[in-house]
């Protein structure tokens, strides 16, 4: 055993002066009862010697404390082939009871670890400690080094490097093996327990959604020690209720050995998010010094550029960090990143990125009180990370290459409108012309690049333009497939969409007129017949503004400018209902084409949709024209049974209590094509007749359904139905508005899409500034009640920016 009390420092040029003096004279004064200059790891009071002349210390107290710990062999170099190690390890202390532990942590520098003031730091001390620690040996004369591995009381796992580029995962369970007497970076202090490993493995199977995720999850726990070269980061994805926080807590809270080697991070700060300050970006990497697991339990979505920066940490490339009041520290991060997120995590598709990120899809929606979750929490709280580390060691030994499997992480249901449009175009045509994407500016190169990486697309030349298509690689096809399936399902479900169920509880106000529908009410019999309803409505001596008192059923007669669309069930089994037909042709209820409005459900399963008519639109009071299971009751030409009524068939209930909305342009075009619209003879100057070879549906007035009668333009989902009035000099004042219904608590997306659609059309048609200002003011004035005006201003500002327009109308900021 080396006599550390008689240690003699090798004299080298440039070494710090007076080191031997301080080392020899530093002393324990605990027995004197006096207070020392610092308290050591055994809670002893230690005094640092001073110069005889002026009573000052020879050098900083931090360096003296490091010499004291070196004297007690608590500073050791790492074990590397050829003894080339340069990283120093300091033995851990149980701060609760002051006892030394068998775990060690890497330090960035002596000066940082021992809090040496910036003005007293010297690189000569860093060199001194590395050189002197290299001279430490065991009782057998073997160099004393910290093994980067995991040690149990009966065995150890580590990666052995032969110095010629070959690494092997080693398991030793021979008590006579001298390496078991070496300090290990992680000493679990307990025997390897196969039953504990099996239990942990069972919980991993339960947590993960698929086999590929289970493979990757089994690699996680021992990954900091058993990777042959540092490269892996783990990303756990799920929306919640999946146990990821409990799993992370097993390492960071419930196991003393792993807790000292764990830290909590903000992945976005490490990756350099644009919304963050320079100070926070500089400080975050410092958390990784001496740590082997770095957990972010709720990471923000990261794009390709940010994940590229995380790759440097995954591979251990040297990085810089600066904490307040300290110099810049350069170090090689050794921690394995473990990031949990419910947002997109986009990487590029090259092989290096696929090797570096191990994705895990978790099963969501676990209930806190279900027995398996209770057992999982108990297991983590009582065993900590031990079982998971044992299971992972065993798995690494069986799979030494540590190959991660592909897991699709980005959720199809999280697609933006721009992404969904691109996928739909590719499914329909095999490619997408992104400059025609109504949800994305074609010159937004960052957004286009992110979209390509997320969906697995590439840009290719087609005729005279660039288009997007699925890249011709297995990785790209794997990325695109779930998005394509989701969009296909949406297409298939459109024709089978069921209407909203009756509200429970029913609103206190049931009358359509209280939601903006002008109408009259007359009594109705239990068989739904309203006797003499027309005479009653036209009688000036009868008040029809309120439902009749004491009546069990009553009719609602639409006033001029209003109509009820009566969606009936299909006449024959297997055929679509009227509601399904409109959803199939126009889109989901609540979209711009099929806007929300006041709805009631009939006892037979049908739907009454209450709408306001656009100016100039006259509907027929029609019943199943062309065999379509949709009736129209409009402008005192007919009636429907009002909500709240009880007939022989049952009760009429409210299914959507939204404010009454105006029929959208697509709805008018659809109704025209199916014979519901009674349009007067058009003014020749304002009508463009349908071309002879047009495949578009043509109404009875010769106007193409879905084509602007003034400009001849095919109307998109944004512009359809917003035809300008040719008689007005200011198009911003004349354009017809169909604002989406907005109730408290609803998303702002419908208003944003609607605003952007209008402004995009203004930009394409080169409107003047007064016209744009008039449109902006009308947008602000016409958003339905329930939408915060300040939020509306913010949304309009965003829509203006996206459309590349500006306005002189004041848009207040929060």
Image: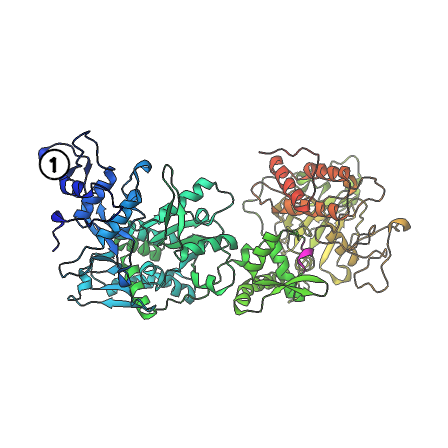
The residue lying toward the viewer, choosing from 17 and 130, is 17
- In terms of depth relative to the viewer, which is nearer, 450 or 797? 450
Q: Position of residue 739 (x, y in %)?
A: 69, 44
Pinpoint residue 643: horizontal percent, then vertical percent.
64, 46
Q: Residue furthest right?
A: 684
Q: How is the image coloured?
A: rainbow
Task: Say whether residue 435 is magenta.
Answer: yes
Please give the name of the residue rendered at 46% of the width and 48% of the height, measured from the top-left corner.
Answer: 268
Using the image as rendered, state which of residue 206 and residue 807 is in the foreground.
807
**Residue 383 falls within the magenta-colored stretch:** no
Res. 508 visible in picture: yes
Quadrant occupied by the N terminus: bottom left
Magenta residues span 433-437
> What x and y, as percent, mark residue 666?
73, 53
Q: Residue at x 13, y 39 (%)?
A: 27
Of residue 137 and residue 626, the one placed in the foreground of this image is 137
The majority secondary structure of the magenta stretch comes to helix
- 534 lies left or right of 175: right
* Residue pointed to by mark 1: 29
Q: Helix or strand or loop: what does disc 1 sit on? A: loop
Query: In the image, what residue occupies the spot 40% across and 60% down?
Result: 231
- Quarter of the image with the C terminus is top right
Horizontally, is 562 left or right of 110 in the view?
Answer: right
x, y (%) of residue 685?
Answer: 90, 49
Q: Is residue 550 left or right of residue 377?
A: right
Question: In the displayed image of the protein, which residue is found farthest to the top?
Answer: 54
Question: Given the current orientation, which residue lies at the most extreme left position?
Answer: 31
């Amino acid at each position: 055993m080396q006599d550390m009390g008689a240690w003699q420092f090798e004299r080298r040029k440039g070494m710090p002066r007076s080191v031997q003096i301080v080392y020899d004279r530093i002393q324990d004064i605990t027995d004197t009862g006096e207070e020392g200059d610092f308290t050591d790891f055994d809670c002893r009071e230690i005094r640092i010697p001073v110069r005889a002349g002026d009573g000052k210390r020879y050098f900083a107290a931090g360096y003296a404390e490091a010499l004291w710990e070196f004297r007690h062999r608590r500073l050791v170099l790492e074990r590397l082939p050829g003894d080339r190690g340069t990283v120093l390890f300091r033995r851990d202390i149980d701060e609760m009871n002051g006892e030394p532990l068998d775990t060690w942590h890497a330090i960035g520098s002596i000066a940082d670890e021992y809090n040496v003031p910036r003005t007293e730091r010297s690189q000569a001390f860093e060199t001194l400690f590395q050189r002197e620690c290299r001279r430490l040996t065991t009782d057998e004369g073997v160099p004393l080094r910290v093994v980067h591995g995991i040690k149990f009381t009966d065995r150890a796992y580590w990666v052995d490097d032969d110095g010629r580029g070959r690494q092997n995962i080693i398991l030793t369970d021979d008590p006579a093996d001298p390496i078991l007497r070496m300090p290990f970076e992680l000493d679990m202090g307990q025997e390897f327990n196969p039953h504990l490993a099996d239990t942990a493995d069972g919980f991993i199977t339960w947590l993960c959604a698929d086999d590929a995720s289970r493979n990757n999850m089994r690699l996680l726990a021992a990954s900091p020690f058993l990777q042959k070269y540092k490269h892996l980061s783990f990303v756990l994805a799920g929306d919640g209720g999946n146990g990821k926080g409990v799993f992370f807590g097993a390492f960071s809270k419930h196991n003393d050995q792993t807790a000292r080697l764990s830290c909590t991070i903000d992945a976005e700060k490490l990756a350099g998010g644009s919304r963050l300050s320079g100070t926070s970006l500089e400080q975050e990497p410092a958390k990784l010094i001496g740590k082997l697991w770095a957990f972010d339990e709720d990471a923000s979505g990261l794009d390709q550029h940010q994940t590229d920066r995380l790759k440097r940490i995954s591979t251990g490339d040297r990085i810089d960090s600066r904490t307040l009041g300290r110099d810049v520290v350069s170090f090689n991060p050794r921690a394995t990143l473990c990031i949990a997120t419910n947002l997109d995590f986009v990487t590029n598709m090259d092989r290096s990125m696929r090797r570096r990120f191990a994705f895990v899809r978790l099963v969501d929606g676990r209930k806190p009180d279900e027995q398996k979750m209770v057992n999982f929490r108990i297991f983590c709280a009582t065993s900590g990370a031990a079982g998971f580390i044992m299971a992972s060691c065993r798995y690494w030994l069986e799979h030494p290459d540590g190959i991660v499997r592909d897991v699709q992480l980005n959720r199809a249901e999280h697609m933006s409108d721009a992404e969904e449009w691109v996928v739909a175009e590719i499914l329909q045509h095999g490619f997408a012309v992104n400059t025609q994407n109504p949800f994305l500016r074609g010159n937004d190169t960052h957004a286009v690049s992110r979209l390509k990486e997320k969906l697995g697309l590439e840009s290719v030349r087609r005729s005279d333009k660039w288009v997007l298509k699925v890249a011709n690689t297995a990785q790209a096809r794997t990325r695109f497939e779930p998005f394509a399936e989701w969009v296909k399902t949406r297409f298939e479900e459109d024709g089978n969409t069921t209407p909203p169920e009756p509200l429970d509880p029913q609103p206190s106000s049931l009358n359509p007129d209280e939601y903006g529908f002008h109408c009259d009410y007359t009594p109705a019999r239990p068989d739904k017949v309203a006797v003499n309803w027309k005479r009653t409505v036209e009688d000036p001596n009868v008040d029809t503004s309120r439902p009749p008192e004491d009546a069990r059923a009553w009719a609602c007669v639409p006033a001029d400018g209003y109509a009820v669309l009566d969606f009936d069930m299909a006449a024959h089994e297997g055929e679509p209902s009227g509601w399904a037909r409109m959803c199939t042709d126009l889109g989901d209820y609540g979209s711009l084409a099929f806007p929300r409005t006041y709805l009631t459900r009939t006892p037979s399963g049908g739907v009454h949709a209450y709408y306001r008519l656009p100016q100039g639109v006259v509907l027929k009071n029609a019943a199943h024209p062309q065999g379509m299971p949709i009736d129209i009751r409009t402008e005192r030409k007919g009636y429907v049974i009002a909500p709240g009524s009880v007939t022989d068939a049952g009760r009429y209930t409210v299914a959507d209590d939204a404010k009454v909305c105006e029929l959208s342009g697509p709805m008018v075009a659809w109704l025209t094509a199916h014979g519901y619209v009674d349009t007067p003879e058009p003014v020749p100057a304002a009508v463009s007749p349908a071309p002879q070879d047009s495949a578009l549906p043509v109404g009875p007035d010769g106007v193409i359904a879905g084509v602007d009668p003034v400009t001849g333009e095919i109307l998109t989902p944004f512009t359809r139905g917003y035809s300008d009035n040719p008689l007005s000099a200011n198009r911003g004042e004349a354009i017809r508005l169909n604002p989406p219904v907005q109730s408290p608590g609803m998303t702002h997306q419908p208003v944003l899409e609607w605003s952007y659609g209008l402004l995009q059309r203004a930009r394409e048609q080169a409107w003047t500034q007064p016209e744009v200002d008039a449109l902006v003011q009308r947008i602000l004035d016409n958003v339905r009640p329930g939408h915060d005006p300040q939020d509306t201003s913010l949304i309009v500002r965003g829509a203006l920016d996206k459309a590349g327009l500006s306005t002189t109308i004041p848009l207040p900021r929060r």
